[in-house]
């Protein structure tokens, strides 16, 4: 099978199996959400939720999660509803674990 035809073939298989770019992001070993809007935080549960592309994504944080507000280190308590964030994360035991959370500068 030539390279172009193989790419089309595998692309159609992935589409048939339901692997869209968003689905792949949710199940890959390390992914990033860019431009999610914080909708809720829970300091006690160490989680936050953001809306990204019309879907709510809930992330669990750990002691190793790095929070950045501009060039300053932050914490979960610095996340405010309505803030726009970029989240680098990975799946673990059915949860999305946030590795790095960067609050985007206000425009």
Image: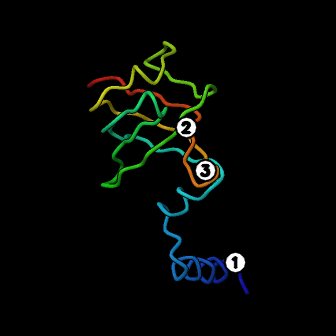
- What residue is disc 2 on? 98
Q: How many marks?
A: 3
Identify the mark nearer the N-term, 2 or 1: 1
State how far apart marks 2 and 1 are (Cα): 37 Å
- Secondary element under disc 2, as helix, strand or loop, is strand
Crowding at mark 2 (Cα within 10 Å: few <14, some 14-19, many 20+): many
Instruction: Please state, as top left, top right, bottom left or bottom right, where the C terminus lies in the image.
Output: top left
Q: Residue at x 43, y 17 (%)?
A: 70
State how far apart marks 3 and 2 are (Cα): 9 Å
Query: Horizontally, is 69 left or right of 80 in the view?
Result: right
Q: Residue at x 33, y 36 (%)?
A: 40
- What residue is disc 1 on? 3
User: Any mark on residue 91, and which?
Assistant: 3
- How far across and how far down the image is residue 81, in percent? 28, 31
Given the current orientation, which residue lies at the most extreme right position? 1
- Secondary element under disc 3, as helix, strand or loop, is strand
Q: Residue at x 61, y 25 (%)?
A: 63
Given the current orientation, which residue lies at the most extreme top position? 72
């Amino acid at each position: 099978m030539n390279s172009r035809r193989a790419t089309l073939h595998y692309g159609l298989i992935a589409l048939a199996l339901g692997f869209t770019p968003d689905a792949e992001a949710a199940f890959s070993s390390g992914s990033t959400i860019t431009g999610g809007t914080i909708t809720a935080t829970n300091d006690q549960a160490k989680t936050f939720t953001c809306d990204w592309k019309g879907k709510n994504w809930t992330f669990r944080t750990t002691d190793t999660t790095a929070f950045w507000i501009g060039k300053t280190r932050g914490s979960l308590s610095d996340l405010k509803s309505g803030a726009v964030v970029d989240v680098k994360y990975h799946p673990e035991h059915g949860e999305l674990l946030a590795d790095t959370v960067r609050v985007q500068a206000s425009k």
